[in-house]
Amino acid sequence: MAEFNVNLRDVGSVSVIDVKGYLDAHTAPELENIFNKLLVEKQFKVVVNFDELKYISSAGLGVFMAYVETMRENKGDIKFSNMKENVYNIFDLLGFPILYEFYKEEKEAVHKFGNQG
Amino acid sequence: MNSVNKIFEKELLVKSTTDNLAIIRDFIKSAANQSGFSEDSAGKIILAVDEACTNIIKHAYKYSPEGSILIKIKFNDPKFSISITDEGSHFDPNKVPEPDLREYYKQKRVGGLGMFLIKKLMDEVNYSTLSGNKNQVILVKYLSN
């Protein structure tokens, strides 16, 4: 069974999602649930912290693609931080760096929303 | 250093459920390690097989958990070949267009990335239809690459 954990926390007005373990077609629905919750709460400024994510497949990438436009239409975004090289390489293969912002540190990504923490 | 084998064959038969993806990845990982692939190359093979099996679960079996997926690995140094066979609906890989991320973004489409990734990650990809309405995809990675 794939191990995956997702945690949601607030940093000022920004919602930070910590993803941990293995994000594949089996576990992607857990991440979708978090995004659906954010939409209900009208939280559109999102940083995803990948520090503890070991693996991602296209099912995981698809979750970000499914929600990013709604976030942007509402003056928010989905920004990425703390990504390991092997995970970043998959995003890169699919051309994500053209359409998404990647940051080394979570606080840089949060700061980009104009949030002082 | 783990022992490396020059020639071997292994197989795994699983039901078409997404919770088996982790079992499939472990199976591929152990075989790739046994063949002497670097962690980076093994990671590519693991992802390609995950994507192929995810496509089978979603599209060939449409999430029905009763389907079967047979994975056979043949390693004959330097050729690492994985055949994945299912008995679900047939699809024509030539009819799946290469994804354009900008178009996907506009249309909120989230599928179709798997096949594109498989092609990028492996050295050879070959889809075929076998007798008895079976579909097969053979993925190949050469050890030297």
Image: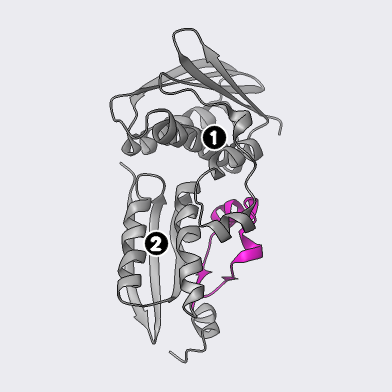
Spot occupied by residue B127 in the image (x, y as percentages of width and height): 59, 22
Quarter of the image containing the C terminus of chain B? top right
The answer to whether residue A57 shows anywhere in this view is no
Q: In which quadrant of the rendered view does residue B54 lie?
A: top left
Q: Residue at x 30, y 72 (%)?
A: A40
Left/right placement of residue A34 relative to residue A113 reads: left
The residue at which mark 2 appears reads as: A19
Q: Residue furthest front?
A: B107
Please check the rendered image and state whether residue A101 is part of the magenta-colored stretch, yes or no. Answer: yes
Q: Are marks 2 and 1 in contact (CB under 8 Å)?
A: no
Compared with B84, B117 (above or below) is below
Left/right placement of residue B17 relative to residue A97 reads: left
Spot occupied by residue B1 in the image (x, y as percentages of width and height): 54, 34
> What range of the chain is rendered magenta?
A78-106
Chain letter of the residue beneath label 2 in the structure image:
A
Spot occupied by residue B97 in the image (x, y as percentages of width and height): 63, 39
Q: CA distance from mark 2 to mark 1?
A: 32 Å
Q: Residue furthest top?
A: B131
The answer to whether residue A11 shows anywhere in this view is yes
Please tell me whether mark 2 sits on a helix, a strand or a loop: strand
Q: Residue furthest right?
A: B144
Compared with A43, A26 (above or below) is above
How packed is label 1: few (under 14 Cα within 10 Å), some, or many (20 or more)?
few
Closer-to-camera residue (B8/B91)? B91
Left/right placement of residue A7 relative to residue A112 reads: left
Closer-to-camera residue (A13/B10)? A13
The residue at which mark 1 appears reads as: B1
- Amino acid type indicated by mark 1: Met
